Amino acid sequence: MASMAERPDLKVDLGRGLHLRSPVIVASGTFGYGFDAPQVDRAALGAIVSKGTTLRPHEGNAPIRIAETPSGMLNAIGLQNPGVDHVAHVYAPQWATWDLPVIVNVAGDSVDEYVAVARRLNGVPGVAGLELNISCPNVQSGLQFGVDPVLAAEVTHAVRAVTELPLIVKLTPNVTDIVAVARAVEDAGADAVSAINTYVGMAIDVRRRRPIISRGSGGLSGAAIKPLALHAVWQLAAEVHIPVVGVGGIMTPGDALEFLLAGATAVQLGTVNYVRPQAAAEIHDGIAAYMVQHGLTDMRALPIRSVSVLTHV
Ligand SMILES: Cc1cc2nc3c(=O)[nH]c(=O)nc-3n(C[C@H](O)[C@H](O)[C@H](O)COP(=O)(O)O)c2cc1C
């Protein structure tokens, strides 16, 4: 039998009873609803986050919806999803038979829509938690909920009131002060925040003289955004009292460890799932090996923040 030193405890706690056996989560939009990725070793995963789910089905945007860049990808999928009823009736009963929590990423274009989706999922067996994607446009103000602390708090508070499920709020980096938004959603009842969603970007086809993505802009993800995401997590971990889930450009075990050292409780893998489906297992094993190497037995020992570190940065 392996000793404790050979098998460190990788369990993490995201609050409100959401205990994960591993800090490695697959990120929304890059893993569908968990049914289409047989190459991924589920034993390495702590949880799956579903594609953004809305009240009614959405076909998403017209192609072209994805473009490669030298160090990442742009996407403008447009929340293609089958709608919450399908998720609750067809997918959740299958998830209930898995030994892996599935967190539903919730999207909407009004507070009422977020609330309706959350209400529909509350108490549904197989749904382990909600992740609110507040990077969707708010039709009333034309803003994304996530760029305004007041709107972000309003939608978080409204959803909190109708669900007992663990509630993670996913922050957009397209803001001046991500900490202000995080503080607002923490005060409004979020159990955790995940940071970050994609950065708005674009690419132009110079031959055809038009944007590659048909909508013009898209969300940039992948290796290009890792230092930016890492800094957001570093700032957030110092300023909020709830778990921070790090996401953005994590491609290797070393990348994941940087986020965990910066104070993330868990990490999400997005774009890398398209590049190397076995990355989740590699990253899980790499974190375990690092802990053995450093004589650590508990994930809570990983964050490095201390006054001496801060003053030397
Ligand atoms: C194709 C694609 C679809 C995505 N769909 C969603 C979504 O539905 N909801 C959401 O909150 N984030 C979505 N994201 C954002 C990712 O979950 C993640 O936050 C982002 O890609 C940064 O992580 P990465 O660099 O590891 O990919 C999507 C990303 C990609 C690449």
Image (spheres, helix red, strand yellow):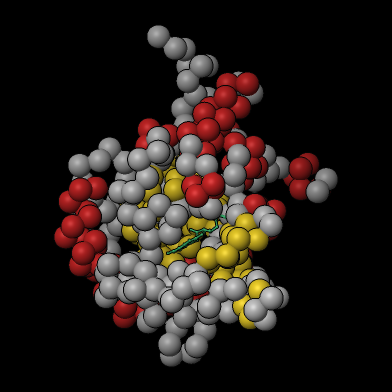
In the rendered image, the residue lying farthest to the front is 207
Which residue does the image show at 43% across and 59% down from the upper left?
Answer: 29
Which residue does the image show at 32% across and 54% down from the upper left?
Answer: 33
Q: Is residue 229 visible?
A: no
Horizontal side, residue 176 vs residue 4: left or right: right
Which residue does the image show at 44% across and 12% down from the upper left?
Answer: 2
Q: For residue 312, which quarter of the picture?
A: top right
**Residue 296 percent coordinates (x, y):** 58, 25
Q: Is residue 216 visible?
A: yes
Horizontal side, residue 113 vs residue 267: left or right: left
Horizontal side, residue 7 vs residue 53: left or right: right
**Residue 267 percent coordinates (x, y):** 52, 46
Q: Nearer the viewer, residue 15 or 36?
A: 36
**Residue 243 percent coordinates (x, y):** 50, 51
Which residue does the image show at 57% across and 65% down from the upper left?
Answer: 67
**Residue 107 percent coordinates (x, y):** 38, 70
Question: In this picture, is 135 found above or below 280?
Answer: below
